[in-house]
Amino acid sequence: MSISLKPLMISGKEVLPLIEGGKGVAVSNGESSGAWAAAGGVGTFSAVNADSVDEHGNITRTVYHGRSRKERFGELVTQAIAGGVSQAKAAHEVAGGEGRIHANILWEMGGAEHVLTGVLEGAKGLVHGVTCGAGMPFRLAPIAAHYQVYYYPIISSARAFRALWLRSYRKHPEWLGGVVYEDPWLAGGHNGLSNSEDPLVPGDPYPRVAELRKTMNEFGLQNTPIVMAGGVWFLREWANWLDNSEIGPITFQYGTRPMLTQESPISDVWKKRLMQLKEGDIRLNKFSPTGFYSSAVYNQFLHELYDRADREIAFVDHPTGDHVESFCFGVRNKEVFVTKQDRKSIAEWMEEGFTKALPTPDSTFVFVSPEKAKEIREDQLACMGCLSQCSFSNWAANEAGTTGRKADPRSFCIQKTLQSIAHGSDPSSHLMFAGHAAYRFAQDPFYANGFIPTVKQLVERICTGD
């Protein structure tokens, strides 16, 4: 089935209604986003701790010298601004004046507002729009208006957009370039699944997007595009969304497919793994230190987290009810009480080598090996404040520098693992974000015999409906 894509006004220019999704920490860079723009669409580079590039084109990784978290946080923000400006310049050069260039930022990253203003200040005229999710970015609109760039909030419900509009966006409607509906069950990376929604029962995106359009129309935004993100593969599967009054102006965002291109900066090993995925290999989980659900490939990294979760038990400080079995832990040999069944499980886990009991903020233990316990502790101590608040290290970007809760060993250092996988480490041993449609790489004849297209070839293919 062929489709007819009509150009759409996006960020002040008529372009193909195809947007490259911004993937954090060096996965969407200037080269890949510039190539997407050059192909006539909207390229999006990640401004989330982006890589800086020297005069020879070599990546300059941040080496942290600060002794405290706050000192390292300052270094991280400085590097993030420099990296974002570097990638904006690269994208502008590759785009050659075609398409549009957007920057993607996570509102819950550490220093998000400071980083965003720093990048827009340092790359004036090079960035046409900003997409922003992971939280409720009320301050996004005034920042975008100040720098005269369009803003694109990423939401997962009409209710969320209503709150953003009424509190902030209605004051700057002229710079609202579009609203990104990111499917919380299908999109890769962090998702906006609410506590009232079942992670195991995906919702149909059509009625949710139709409801979003209805809400936008209430506010006079009939001509403002909605960006459908998450689960988009063949455009022919979305043909009934085109020229549809219930949906209105629509454009489509691709996050996963651009990873498997010649311009994509991810490693060849990572690209090969993408082509081997099967349906069900992507897991929606809640291990992220952000507190959000996220979707990633079930690999050794995720497997260890699920196993760790299976070795969690509750304890109390004084014997009560079923919790009457004594257990001592830590360097001070503190005594707590667990159930008889859990005491039996502890003995079994210790025989298997999981001899370290790590307390959580919820009066539970997780049992890990001494090596894993050491790694967790070292990662917590090395925190550089990449999030506005982090459950894993208990860092928060506030005066106290802490969430006020104990560090949580059930999670992980997200900055460490994302930087590692983005710069060539084994993807099976690190957090490997991917959308739930990634298994289609192995089924799509376009990628037969290991074919990896250029971005231009991919965009041309998408425009055919495939």
Image (spheres, rainbow, N blue to C red):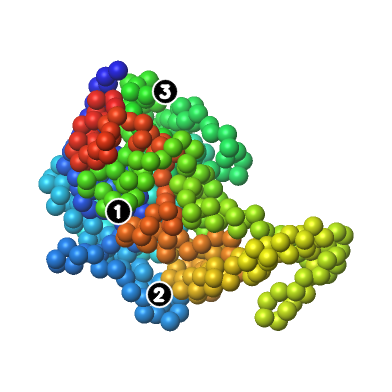
First reached walking from the N terminus: tag 2 or tag 1: 2
Residue topped by disc 3: 246
**Looking at the rendering, in which quadrant would you find the C terminus?**
top left
Q: Nearer the viewer, mark 2 or mark 3?
A: 2
Q: Left or right of 173: which side holds 401?
A: right
Callout 3 secondary element: loop
What is the three-letter code of the residue carrying label 1?
Ser
Residue topped by disc 2: 72
Q: Left or right of 466: which side holds 113?
A: right
Q: Residue furthest right?
A: 321
What is the three-letter code of the residue carrying label 3?
Glu
First reached walking from the N terminus: tag 1 or tag 3: 3
- Report, in whole angstroms, how far the alpha carbon at label 2 lies from the one at label 3: 49 Å
In the image, is residue 386 above or below residue 270? Answer: below
Q: Left or right of 100: which side holds 109?
A: right
Q: Nearer the viewer, mark 2 or mark 1?
A: 1
Q: Left or right of 146: which side holds 349?
A: right
Q: Quadrant of residue 223?
A: top left
Residue topped by disc 1: 267
Question: In this orientation, does residue 220 appear?
Answer: yes
In the image, is residue 209 above or below residue 116? Answer: above
* Picture coordinates of residue 5, whole percent (x, y): 25, 25
* Picture coordinates of residue 229, whole percent (x, y): 39, 37
Q: Nearer the viewer, mark 1 or mark 3?
A: 1
Q: Residue furthest left?
A: 96
Disc 3 crowd rating (10 Å Cα; few below 14, some 14-19, many 20+) is some
Callout 2 secondary element: helix
